[in-house]
Amino acid sequence: MKKSDVIQLIFHNKLPVEPAREKGLAFAPTNIALCKYWGKRDSELNLPMTGSLSIALPDKGALTSLMLHDNGCDVITLNGKELPGDSAFVLRTTQFLDLFRPERKWFLKIDINMNIPVAAGLASSAAGFASLVSALNDLFGWKLSRRELSILARLGSGSASRSLWTGFVEWHAGVQADGMDCYAEQLKDEWPGLMIGIVSVAEGEKPVSSREAMQRSVDTSTLYTAWPRKVARDLVILRQALHVKNFSLLGGTAESNALNMHATMISSWPPVCYFLPETIAMMHKVWDLRRSGLEIYFTQDAGPNLKLLFLENDKDKIFEHFPQVEMIQLFE
Ligand code: PMV
């Protein structure tokens, strides 16, 4: 099954070539997984081995605007800078756009503004692809449901399937080969006092992409066989923790889930280690603070930065211990 087959299933030979309006515009938030997506059952369609559950950072993400451009190529501007046509970012975006224009009949001027570091484990590709499909939906008047947009965003980057909503979002692994049952959905639960703190250890490009790292874990880590069981259990616990607003349960499960994911990477060959000395020092600090009674947990993605989880009541104490933290309110 190829990506173009999925496009066929969604559009049934009716892909519009004329825009419905002059400009398409959409914002998509980035998301942080509390239960991670790690490993694919189909790498062409980005179908995951397991489900996952995330929280959106409502004001952090990508704002994408699109207009037709008749120069015979796409022009992409990222945060005000035009990107060279042969850059990895442009090639990946253009390839994705080709899915929707098999005959290359139109090209776009794309303006993307992101208020998150690109490719530093802060899910910039998730927000990027989710805002791109939503802006295309706007420009061409596709009138697709969010579920369909979630499926399309997944074809760009797996975690993008979760970036179509704010709040808590669960991405279902599905079982079908065409992935039509593999999409995300917003959960009803809200948690006004819950906060995330981003502590930046490094903002450079990551040494190994998450795509490559997860494939290596699946192929070479003997610990990977335990991962689907861990996820199945954590998803049940997280849903319950959200339901009863048990913060220790939520934080502990999210932290343990992230550490289990990193254990599969470290045990891969060649090993993948996103920890920097500063990352480990910060983990110890979190554990020390927790031992002293402060309810604080962390999660970590495919990069060296930690995301702290805490409750609004402890905001001042967290700020005292991590003066460089960027605090994010998750619900209004
Ligand atoms: O969607 P990708 O290919 O960028 O992979 C994301 C992987 C993690 O961020 C590490 C986990 C997750 O669920 O977001």
Image (spheres, rainbow, N blue to C red):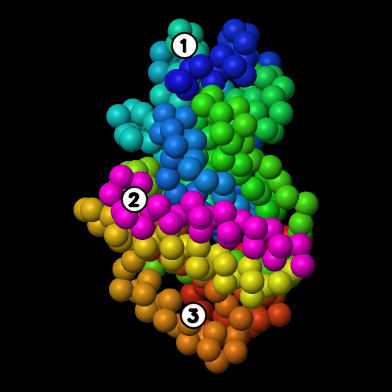
C-alpha span from label 3 to label 2: 27 Å
Earlier-in-chain disc, 3 versus 2: 2
Q: Give the magenta part as a residue range.
A: 217-244
**Circle 3: residue type:** Val
C-alpha span from label 1 to label 3: 50 Å
SS at circle 3: helix
Residue that appears at 51% across and 68% down: 255
Dot 3, how many residues are within 10 Å of its Cα: few (below 14), some (14-19), or many (20+)?
many
Residue that appears at 55% across and 18% down: 7
Q: What residue is shown with label 1?
A: 102
Where does the C terminus fall, quadrant-wise? bottom right
Give residue 130's mark: none
The residue carrying mark 3 has its beta carbon less than 8 Å from ligand 1: no
Q: What residue is shown with label 2?
A: 217
Q: Is residue 238 above or below residue 22?
A: below
Q: Select label 1 or label 3 by which is in front.
A: 3
Residue that appears at 48% across and 43% down: 49
Q: Is residue 79 above or below residue 35?
A: above
Q: Select label 3 or label 2 by which is in front.
A: 2
Residue that appears at 60% across and 27% down: 180
Give residue 286's mark: 3
Q: Select label 2 or label 1 by which is in front.
A: 2
Q: Is residue 320 visible?
A: yes
Q: Is residue 135 visible?
A: no
**Circle 2: residue type:** Ser
